[in-house]
Image (cartoon, rainbow, N blue to C red):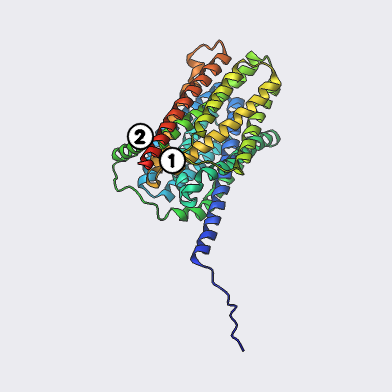
Amino acid sequence: MKANTNTIRAPTTETVNMSERSLQLFCYVVFLFLTFLFIGSSLVTIAWIAVEDSSIAVVGRIFLLSSLTGIGISLLGGVLTDSWNRKMVIRLGITAQVIALVILLYAILEGHSLPPFLYIFSVLNTAGMAVKAGAIDSVFQAIVSKERRVAMSVRVSIIRQLGLAIGMGGGGILLDQTSAIFCISLLLVVSISRFAISEVFLNSLKKIKRSSSSNPMQLWKEGLAYAANDKNIYLSICGVALTFSAAQMTNVLVPGFVQDELAAGSDVYGLLEMAWAIGGGTILLIAAFKHHSSPYSKVEALLLCLLGISMMLFSFLRFIPALILLYAIMGGLFSITRARFDGKILTFCPEGMMGRVRATTSMLTNSIGMVIYLIPTLFSITSVSGLYMAWGAFILCVGLLIWLFQASSIGSKRRSTET
């Protein structure tokens, strides 16, 4: 008789690693979904509480304080991410957000005057997000291979968009049907649940190299010098900041544009915001199943130019159905451009520099946001559409400059390869 040659093979190390990596990626995606659900719901909840308890001016101060905090804490977060235990940085960030919710919940239950506690919440919540931003990006780098990062960044952005939409829509419905206390308690449950989920993918950070220097100034000097010497990184940082500036400008000006330029009401404003979200989600969903070009391509700069042109068109259109369609296109351009620029940062930035590069991106984004948020306060706005036109033209010009820089970079790379 012949011996039975059909033996059961034990799982190989490669199979086990792939299975573990898939689980980590799944938990990372769930974590991101809950994070953006938290962001969307907290934005709606906090703004509503502020207006109901005080005034719209308090909402403006909350946004401004959030931008200031983001700039300051990003400096600290970048250094901590690249020089300390990244697991602890992520846990520290979540803890700060939990404490912010507990303090605000206590103030509401005790019947205190809410504006001071809303400011405290804004500082702690923004600090929590800013301090762990680079460390979360490091998780993505550890889980996803370099050649897949741009495509995966686009796909992950769908989850972000979905979480944000559900958070904002669900937050509004829950506020209407329940109470602020219930909404904040639910946010607290979501934040705490992220602790358990994050423990699964934090194991991927064990082998990340950390900088040998412990001097914060030296660390920042190294990080900035590296970013300044890599066109792909500093152009992507500028691209992310400019892309977000379109959304920041929209947040500030669209309500006034609807009232003053269109002589319309909140129904049109709601339709515009819905169109932005639908446009963003749709284009990301389409892009997720498309082949993505090389990370060295110039497509992001062209998308940025299109975003600027769409803002300019939006400034002088007055036919509401056309405006709604154009606003959906703007939302789509914002989402895909941001995702691709983010993917390029994640592709070209070394793991040891990720904290400082992400912090630099956050600081630039928040700085531009502060300027935009202060425009209505510092200047007498006679034409909202004029501001849209000017900012759209600015984005278009910078997009063209980024395209030229990328073209020269690709040309230099080809010439060096040929020689």
Above or below, 3 relative to 323: below
| Residue 131, disc | 1
Residue at disc 1, secondary structure: helix
Is residue 174 or residue 77 the one in the foreground? 77
Image side of residue 365 versus residue 186, left or right: left
In which quadrant of the rendered view does residue 347 lie? top left
Q: Name which residue lies at 54% across and 44% down.
A: 151
Please determine whether, in this image, residue 77 is positioned above or below residue 65: below
Residue 30 at x, y percent in the picture: 58, 48
Is disc 2 placed on a helix, strand or loop? helix
Q: Measuring from the top left, give residue 12's x and y in whole percent.
A: 51, 67
Q: Which mark is residue 337?
A: none
Tell me where residue 229 appears, x and y as whole percent. 34, 36
Seen in the image, is 142 located left or right of residue 159? left
- Direction bottom: furthest residue: 1
Q: Residue at x 56, y 31 (%)?
A: 334
Identify the amino acid type marked 2. Answer: Ala
Which quadrant of the figure has residue 234?
top left
| Quadrant of the image containing the N terminus | bottom right
Give the quarter of the image for residue 23. bottom right
Whole-percent x and y of residue 402? 45, 29
Task: Say whether residue 84 is visible.
Answer: yes
Who's the residue at 55% across and 38% down the image?
106
Of circles 1 and 2, which is in front? 2
Disc with the residue nearer the chain's start (1 vs 2): 1
Q: Are marks 1 and 2 in contact (CB under 8 Å)?
A: no
Label 1 Cα crowd, 10 Å radius (few <14 / some 14-19 / many 20+): many
Residue hosting label 2: 228
Residue type, label 1: Val
